[in-house]
Amino acid sequence: MFDVLTSRFDGIFTRLRAKGRLSETDVDAALREVRLALLEADVNVSVVRDLLARIRERALGQEVSKALTPGQQVIKIVHEELITTLGSEAVPLVDASPLVVLMVGLQGSGKTTSAAKLARHLRSRRPLLVAADLQRPAAVDQLEALGERLGVPVYADRRARPARLVKAALREAARDGHGAVIIDTAGRLQIDRELMRELSDVAKAADPDEVLLVVDAMTGQDAVNVAKGFLSHVDLTGIVLSKLDGDARGGAAISVREVTGCPIKFAGVGEGLEDFEAFHPDRMASRILGMGDVLTLIERAEATFDAEEAARAAEKMEKGTFTLEDFLTQFQQLKRMGPLQDLLAMLPGAGSTLGGIEIDERDLKKVEAIIRSMTPEERQNPRIIGGSRRRRIAAGSGTRPQDVNRLLKQFADAQKMMKMLAGGRGLPGLPGPIPGRRRKR
């Protein structure tokens, strides 16, 4: 979502780093560019004004004038003030048992899907989903289908009024020992009296510990107006940003916290039910400014990769015995972490280092298809793959023999490199063995 904004900031910061000393004119010129970048990203005007005022006050103060590298110090200030705008620190859900969460939002904001994602996030607490959206056609069916996929029970009664349904659901949750109750409520295409009256009745019946407003991150500044509209009628405790993986400019994510005063608690970062993360202002600010997000990358890896399998793969790499079978296993686990382009964006400096390089997911699917078209014996020992086998693999994977040849060559080169590293002989073109390794006798 933040690709364009990140690119703009990278250019601004590159120019700042090149300057040995910064005058007031230099600071003002940089802030003008920052202002334009934020406004183009559809950030709320008042948020931009307040953010730049704080940055300018600090950038022209003693902490920059006395710094050894003023440009780096200004970048640090921008980073810190952006974190403040996004909310300073992560705000978790309140500690309650059972935890009752009321999900509210406009129709089409991703509310029902976010309710299911939150249920998955809280699966250790045996959550109960409550289908209290009786206005939108098929809303109950959608929630029941999502609950079935997750293995989470859904309480539904299409004939009851929402408030009465919620009371009955809470009684069932208490009787069955559910540790969390997540209530999906009705939405409209716009805020109206009927919607707010029904929402008020449901809130009284539920007496929720959390009221989370689901905001579509792709709606730009309008998301701020939606949040303010709900805030005037409901006691919101937090915000869920849905569709943060979209191609919008990201203004809602930067604006909504400061305008409403409500913390952003979660973000939907993909279409899968697992694509749901706790919102960390410091990590999001780093990603926006092109500084990466290594902590989130590590957390995704820990949640995705099997530790024993990863250890075995690392040992095989070290010994130079890593096979295409092992590669396919690791590749499948990597796919579960999300799009590779998004993962690369979490690496510090990846934006400026890789420039505008785009990774075509179709090429990755082609690699997987080729390996899947091989027999187990061929994956273990690719050397046996001759001309006829190459043609068979290409036909089975919908590719060309040249594609199979290219993959086999690349894998053979990688195996050679692994063996050289394992033997302590160093990389080609580099002098001497790898430090800490002994040559094999």
Image: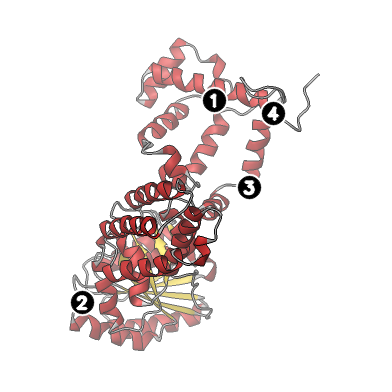
Q: Are marks 4 and 3 in contact (CB under 8 Å)?
A: no
Q: Under tag 1, what secondary structure? A: helix
Amino acid marked by disc 4 = Lys
Question: Picture coordinates of residue 314 (x, y %)?
Answer: 65, 37
Q: Are marks 4 and 1 in contact (CB under 8 Å)?
A: no
Q: Is residue 61 above or below residue 236?
A: above
Q: Between 257 and 342, which is closer to the camera in this rendering?
A: 257
Question: Picture coordinates of residue 131 (x, y %)?
Answer: 33, 73
- Residue at the spot of label 2: 191
Q: Is residue 9 above or below residue 52?
A: above
Q: Under tag 3, what secondary structure? A: helix
Amino acid marked by disc 1 = Arg
Question: Picture coordinates of residue 33 (x, y %)?
Answer: 32, 55
Foreground tag (4 vs 3): 4
In the visual, does 431 lie left or right of 233?
right
Q: Under tag 2, what secondary structure? A: loop
Mark 1, Cα crowd under 10 Å, few <14 / some 14-19 / many 20+, is many
- Name which of mark 1 and mark 3 comes first in the sequence: 3
Mark 3, Cα crowd under 10 Å, few <14 / some 14-19 / many 20+, is few
- Residue at the spot of label 3: 307
Amino acid marked by disc 3 = Ala
